[in-house]
Image: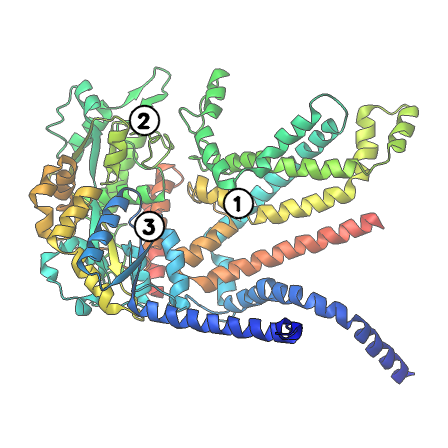
Amino acid sequence: MASRSSATATGAFNQNLGAYLFLAPALLILFLSLLLPAVATIGMSLTDVSFLRPTTFVGLDNYLRLLSDGRFQQAVGNTTYYTLGVTLPTMVLGLLAAVALNRRFPFRIAFRTIFYLPVLTSLIAAAVVWVYLYEPYSGPMNGFLVSLGLPPQPWLQSPDLAMTALIIMAVWRDFGTAMIIYLAGLQDIPEEIYEAARLDGAGRLAILRRITVPMLSSVTFYLMIILIVQSFQVFGAIYVMTGGGPLGSTETIVFQMYQTAFGYTEFGYAAAMSTVLFFVILLFSIVGTKIMRRGEA
Amino acid sequence: MSDKSLTLSRRELLLGVAASSLALGFAGVSSRAFGQDQQLVFWSQFAGSKRAAGEALETAFKAAHPERNLVSTLYAEPPQLNEKILTSINGNTAPDLFVQHWDYNLTYAAGDRMLDLGEALDVDMAALDPSLLAYGHINGAQYSIPMYGTSRGIGFNRAYVIEAGLDPEAPPTTWAEFRDWAIALTKRHESGLLERAGFSMFHNDLEAWEVFTLFLQGAGGTLLNEDLSAPTFAGPEGVKALTFLHGLLHEDKVTDLGFGLGPGGLASPFNSGRASMIIAGNYSTNNALRAGIEFDLAPIPKENGGYTSLVDPFCYAVPRDARNVEGAVEFIAFALTPEQQVAFAVESKNVPVLKSAQQDPAVQADPYLAKFVETASYAPAEAPAIPAFSRLVTIIARAVQEAMFNRTSVEDALAAAANEVQTILDRG
């Protein structure tokens, strides 16, 4: 019996050999570009590697240092605030825009294009423009506030406001992606369900709450995971707009990682930060996937 | 000739392609290897206002040394060059020579990856400005040699000074006079909204560190002790300096925190006419003039008379494993000749490291450059030349801002920063 199953397995392997051979180049590239660097980073996090001085094994010292590092804790807090601040409004605005633009009305394609345009602009170019929008004394944002009789705000220069200002910019840039994904999801909902609901006397809000939102739950979870992972890794806008300041109020984990590695040449410590971030993102991804599968089941 | 003789089998074709590829590859490798022997690979950070000066220097070197095949690559920002250098040192693909902001060079030197230019270079070190040279000196060796430096002074708008009834020819000579100027030059609306800052203090970490350090020196203090093993900035002088700055902000209200974009672009408060005084460096001149500001420069006064300043050099360094050390050293020696030093300084408006070039009539003929040369002479001869300098800047800048934003007291902010710096210095 055993030899028969072994022969079957060998036969199956031989039958799939061609497929494995075709997959081999892609697997090799994935191994070299994803798995190997990830494993190397975990290895580096257990050393004091600087690429300039001799490297020594330090065990879990870098991780223990992270626990008592006030700046890292501030970066974790900032990253969490940024992630929540970006993810929720982006999804809500994306859903509302998608629902609005899923109806037939003149220029709806033009509106879709306009809402999606920020996604296509270069992040750095957009960040530079937003720096000027936020200019405290002559920027349009404060011009608008002053026209309402409100005092101008030091958007990017205040430790209390800077991260919120970055979140606003990120939502502006990302909600187009959410809109497109929701639009695709909306088009999968059969029209008959809406018709039946209308015949039963359901209003617009009830349809949105009881049909659209539940039917989009798998899209919502997918989007949420994408946005969380993306927000956890924010770097470019911060590098250009605030440099992590003022008072470290916009310093996120990835920004601090970059600064620790290239600014202070503490690659081992930066690798520990990176490993922590990797596992946090992995955790979110696993939980999200499980919830999504449970929803589908 | 038969048809068969013209037909290639698949096997023959593949063999032919493989053989040709090998032959071409071998030819390429050998010619590249030959070419590399002749090359002098130079990674430059002579960008922005220094670009034309850097290109002229390279052209002059090529003309004077046609036997050296100078291959240069320009990097826009020091961090960008730093990333390249760190990875290249590790991958054994480092250039023969590079010019970089001094603190990065000290980091590379701390890992024993740089050549001691004090030994390798046949140049009279006594002819070079010691305050600039100090930034390349670490562990008893001269690991990098400055090409030029920027110095700091009080940049002011002459039109606003005259408008306020002050004499631009008699700038402040003490902190008290500086404070009077800052108050007189500040303009606020009746609502309290700041229209024009008397003294725009800082817009980022680097500027926060800089303004504190200058006033610390003005109070007679230093950042670190003599052997650079312990912080001294949290002493009475540091407290006095930060208290003075805090007073300017919160009592005299000569500026608001977060007043405008920094640091020195055309939209900055000073260049857009919304600030009367700033801490200015050589780099401030071009943008201020381009913005139509009546720019002028004065030395930074100490508390009770006398002046102080900072210099900030960009330095040449040669990796210990460079392939063309001879060529690299020759380039540095060429760049330090009086002709090249004067030409570079006049074109880029930076302070030359060669003392004789600083006093050259061509340099002195430029009114702004001459004033920056003068302010450079007030910089301390000792430098906080430690590999962890960039971290020191961040820590002190945070402390300054903690106090300025009233998150903590001046004393507590400085004491906490000093503890943090001590930990880093102890770590080595």
Residue A264 in view (yes/no): no
Residue B344, position as x, y percentages in the image: 19, 47
As measured in the structure, the alpha-carbon distance from the residue carrying label 2 to the one carrying label 1 is: 33 Å
Q: Residues within 10 Å of mark 3 (few under 14, many from 20)?
A: some
Amino acid bearing label 1 = Asn
* Disc 3 versus disc 2: nearer the observer: 2
As measured in the structure, the alpha-carbon distance from the residue carrying label 3 to the one carrying label 1 is: 22 Å
Amino acid bearing label 2 = Ser
Chain letter belonging to callout 2: B
Please say if the residues under marks 3 and 1 sit with CB atoms less than 8 Å apart: no
Chain letter belonging to callout 3: B
- Residue placed under numbered mark 1 in the picture: A78
Q: Relative to residue B284, is residue B345 depicted above or below?
A: below
Q: A134 or A152, which is in the foreground?
A: A134
As measured in the structure, the alpha-carbon distance from the residue carrying label 3 to the one carrying label 2 is: 28 Å
Under circle 2, the secondary element is loop
The answer to which image quadrant residue B126 occupies is bottom left
